[in-house]
Image: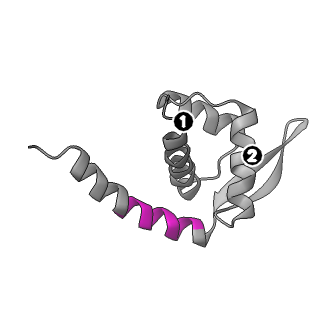
Amino acid sequence: MDGREFYSSLIRLHILHHAVKEPIFGLGIIEELARHGYKLSAGTLYPMLHDMERKGYLSSVEERVGRQNRKLYRATDLGKVTLENAKEKVRKLFGELFEES
């Protein structure tokens, strides 16, 4: 097992984290995630973004950049609350995972 099933939720939290701070777009978040060791293709990321938008965690707008349109995603109020709740759970889990024995 390579752990991908566990990383999916971590990636979603990472996306929410950045979408709370500022608008994000596909290639930009792929590059950001790569800096943290996650190698995602557009074929993996975009369905994840669309799913998060469909579930109400993200909202998007199209912006013209040069000759192309770029879809920018922001965290919704639900996304912000979800991230805050998840941060507390991650904080507790982190404490257990790295607790000195």
Q: Work out whether residue 54 or residue 3 is closer to the camera in this orientation and state it.
A: 3
Query: Residue at (70%, 50%) from the top-left corner?
Result: 49
Query: Residue at (25%, 46%) from the top-left corner?
Result: 97
Callout 1 crowding tier (Cα within 10 Å): few <14, some 14–19, many ≥20: few
Using the numbered discs, state the Cα–Cα distance from disc 2 to disc 1 in whole angstroms: 16 Å
Query: Residue at (35%, 63%) from the top-left corner?
Result: 88
Determine contact: label 2, label 1, CB under 8 Å: no
Residue 47 placed where, x, y %? 75, 46
Going by the numbered disc 1, the residue's amino acid type is: Arg
Residue 98 image-quadrant placement: top left
Magenta-colored stretch includes residue 97: no
Relative placement, left or right, of 99 versus 59 is left
Magenta stretch, main secondary structure, is helix
Question: Mark 2 = which residue?
Answer: 47
Which segment is the magenta one? 79-88
- Any part of residue 59 in sight: no
Magenta-colored stretch includes residue 80: yes
- Any part of residue 44 in sight: yes
Question: Mark 1 = which residue?
Answer: 4
| Residue 77 higher or lower than 31, as above or below | below
| Residue 44 higher or lower than 91, as above or below | above
Residue 39 placed where, x, y %? 58, 27
**Mark 2, mark 1: which one is toward the viewer?**
1
